[in-house]
Image: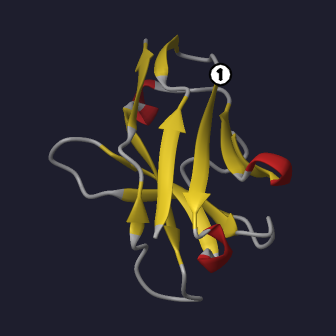
Amino acid sequence: QVQLVESGGGLVQAGGSLKLSCAASGRTSEIVRIGWFRQVPGKERERVAAMTWTGELPAYADSVKGRFAISRDNAKNTIHLQMNSLKPGDTAVYFCAARSTIVGNYQYWGQGTQVTVSS
């Protein structure tokens, strides 16, 4: 089992920045790919950014390219999502997720952290 705990959400004005963190624990050696998703009530969950557990092959949603960056702190088994130039449309609950397969569904999820961007 892998446990994921997010932190760093909050309220920010449009144009501002936030950095989310996700601490992974448990059987982290199983993780193949890890990323960030977000969800707004009434809408489908959207994958925002993801990468391999070793920090390679980053991928971003078109809506955040050039503004968000995913990274890993190897020493702390923690990944980050640096979010810059935030827009009200980025308001959502952000989830950290991981999977132990090259392809397929993410089977490990954090509890989520709220990000609210005011105009």
For residue 45, which quarter of the picture? bottom left
Task: State the image coordinates of residue 17 (x, y, percent, origin top left).
Answer: 65, 22
Identify whether 111 is placed above or below 90: below
Picture residue at 57% right of the left edge, 26% below the top? 86
Identify whether 119 is placed above or below 25: above
Task: State the image coordinates of residue 99 (x, y, percent, origin top left).
Answer: 51, 75
Q: Is residue 82 left or right of residue 42?
A: right
Picture residue at 59% right of the left edge, 65% below the top? 34
* 10 Å crowding of disc 1: few (<14), some (14-19), many (20+): some
For residue 116, which quarter of the picture? top left
Q: In this view, does 110 lie to the left or right of 16?
A: left
Q: In this view, does 98 lie to the left or right of 112?
A: right
Q: Can residue 38 be seen in this view?
A: yes
Q: Is residue 60 visible?
A: no
For residue 84, which quarter of the picture? top right
**Residue found at the very far left of the displayed protein:** 42
> SS of the residue at dot 1?
loop
In the foreground, 111 or 67: 111
Task: State the image coordinates of residue 58 (x, y, percent, origin top left).
Answer: 73, 65
**Residue found at the very far right of the displayed protein:** 75
Which quarter of the figure is the C terminus placed in? top left
Q: In this view, does 78 lie to the left or right of 5?
A: right
Residue designated by label 1: 17
Picture residue at 46% right of the left edge, 70% below the top? 1
Colour mapping: secondary structure
Say what amino acid the circle numbered 1 marks: Ser
Picture residue at 71% right of the left edge, 69% below the top? 53
